[in-house]
Image: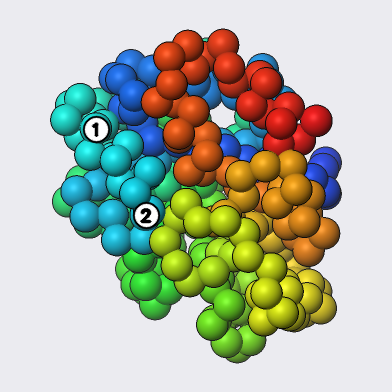
């Protein structure tokens, strides 16, 4: 049982996760930000590793990735920074990014290195489910890493049940099929989607992402899922002067 499993076993509701990009706004801040977020009360974190063609990311996260790459962030540099992670941070940590850098690094080596550094799970939005199942699943399970699958409003019930069977921590529910950074739009169809997922009584917890930016959207998401993820709004905060001192108040504005 990794830290993610322990978290979901002990806490069922109102879970808050924060996403940010490694290497933004500067190199060597990844663990500092993680430590500050844990102290502010966040339940788990998603650390993105930048990629030059982030097709699912909106302007804010795209900019953070571009800046991180300009700052010199690479997977090797990220793993170097994360050597300090478990000396300072105890909450679950996931790495999130696109499949191309992982394949170039070597999927088996990537999983082994991530696990050695105390990472608990990986989110790879563009990794096909069949490739994970047929080629890579053993690398995850051998290293006690959770692979997090994404579900959209267009995902069929059959595929959702398949994902539920392959998952061992939580399922990431996208609030829409658009890019990151938009607002949570509770149209009738989206609300029906959330209700449909909830009625399926899946084995794994669900966490909603995309469009969570304040207490109202976080609270609404938690009506339908076990928690929610804030990304673009937090990444915007990192562009401000004195962002480290602002983190506690930011988290209180999401979950008082």
Distance from Cα at disc 1 to Cα at disc 2:
14 Å
Looking at the image, is 236 positioned above or below residue 188?
Answer: above
Left or right of 185 on screen, residue 46: left
Q: Is residue 5 visible?
A: no
Residue at 21% of width from left, 55% of height from top? 53
Could you tell me which residue is drawn at 37 percent across and 44 percent down? 61
Indicate whether 227 appears above or below 184: above
Q: Is mark 1 on a helix, strand or loop?
A: helix
Q: Mark 2 points at which residue?
A: 57
Q: Is residue 43 visible?
A: yes
**Label 1 or label 2, whichever comes before in sequence order:** 2
Q: Is mark 2 on a helix, strand or loop?
A: loop
- Give residue 202's position: percent from left, percent from top: 74, 72
Packing grade of label 1 (10 A; few <14, some 14-19, many >=20) is: some
Identity of the residue drawn at 36% across and 66% down: 127
Q: Give residue 122's position: percent from left, percent from top.
A: 46, 49
User: In the image, is residue 150 above or below residue 119?
Assistant: below
- In terms of depth relative to the viewer, which is nearer, 85 or 41? 41
Disc 1 designates what residue?
A: 67
Q: Residue at x 34, y 24 (%)?
A: 25
Find residue 178 and name its label.
none
């Amino acid at each position: 049982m990794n830290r993610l499993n322990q978290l979901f076993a002990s806490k069922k509701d109102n879970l808050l996760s924060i996403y940010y990009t490694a290497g933004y706004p500067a190199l060597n801040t990844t663990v500092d930000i993680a430590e500050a977020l844990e102290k502010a009360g966040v339940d788990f974190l998603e650390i993105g590793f930048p990629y030059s063609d982030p097709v699912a990311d909106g302007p804010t996260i795209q900019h953070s990735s571009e800046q991180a790459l300009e700052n010199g962030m690479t997977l090797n540099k990220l793993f170097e920074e994360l050597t300090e992670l478990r000396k300072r941070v105890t909450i679950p940590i996931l790495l999130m990014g696109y499949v191309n850098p992982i394949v170039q690094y070597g999927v088996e080596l990537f999983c082994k290195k991530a696990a050695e550094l105390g990472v608990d799970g990986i989110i790879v939005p563009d990794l096909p489910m069949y490739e994970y199942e047929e080629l890579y699943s053993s690398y995850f399970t051998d290293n006690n890493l959770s692979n997090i699958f994404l579900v959209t409003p267009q995902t069929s019930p059959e595929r959702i049940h398949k994902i539920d069977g392959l998952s061992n921590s939580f399922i990431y529910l996208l609030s829409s099929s658009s890019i990151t950074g938009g607002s949570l739009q509770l149209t009738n169809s989206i609300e029906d989607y959330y209700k449909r997922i909830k009625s399926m009584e899946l084995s794994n917890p669900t966490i909603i992402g995309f469009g969570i930016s304040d207490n109202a959207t976080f609270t609404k998401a938690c009506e339908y899922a076990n928690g929610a993820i804030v990304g673009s709004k937090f990444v915007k905060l990192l562009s401000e002067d004195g962002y480290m001192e602002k983190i506690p108040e930011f988290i209180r504005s999401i979950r008082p």
